[in-house]
Amino acid sequence: MEEAEELCDRVGIFVDGNFQCLGTPMEVQLKARYGGARVLTITTAAEHGEAVARVVSRRCPGAAKVYGVGGTQKFEVPRRGDGGHRLDGVLRAVEAARRTVPVQGWGVADATLEDVFVTVAKEAGAFHVLS
């Protein structure tokens, strides 16, 4: 996906053989529609996963846990314009988590083309076989 984001002029996403969307990888509209959230990743020891999830949900209502594998948890935090949070609110959630449990690493990023693909695939029901 990184290569497509850097090298392609336009990207189309197909799910189960059906065309879902088309746009430029860096197009604000494409990412805003399918990947408008910030991505917050926090890594702790595995036993602290639930504590981190509680802190993030308390500090950033509306944040959705994408996954938790081992001690790494990924959350989508809506942007302020979507009823979400300013970046300083997200950073305060990280600081609150660091006071609660030992945080080994963390990061905040904008949605990537991969995040857009996963969102489009979920909306198309492509992951029903994994449920």
Image (cartoon, grey):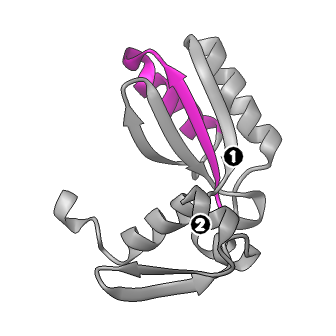
Q: Is residue 12 shown above or below 62?
A: below
Residue flagged by tag 2: what amino acid is it? Ala
Residue 109 got which mark? 1
Indicate the position of residue 76 as horizontal and vertical percent values: 57, 50
Q: Is residue 76 shown above or below 108?
A: below
Q: Which residue is mark 2?
A: 4
Is 52 colored magenta in this rendering?
A: yes
Q: Residue at x 79, y 44 (%)?
A: 87
Q: Residues within 10 Å of mark 1 (few under 14, many from 20)?
A: few
Q: Residues within 10 Å of mark 2 (few under 14, many from 20)?
A: some
Q: Residue at x 51, y 40 (%)?
A: 74
The quadrant where residue 14 appears? bottom left
Closest to the observer, 21 or 78: 21
Q: In the rendered image, which quarter contains the N terminus?
A: bottom right
Q: Residue at x 66, y 34 (%)?
A: 107
Magenta highlight range: 36-59
Q: Residue 107, can we see it?
A: yes
Indicate the position of residue 116 as horizontal and vertical percent values: 54, 66
Residue flagged by tag 1: what amino acid is it? Ala
Q: Residue 36, can we see it?
A: no
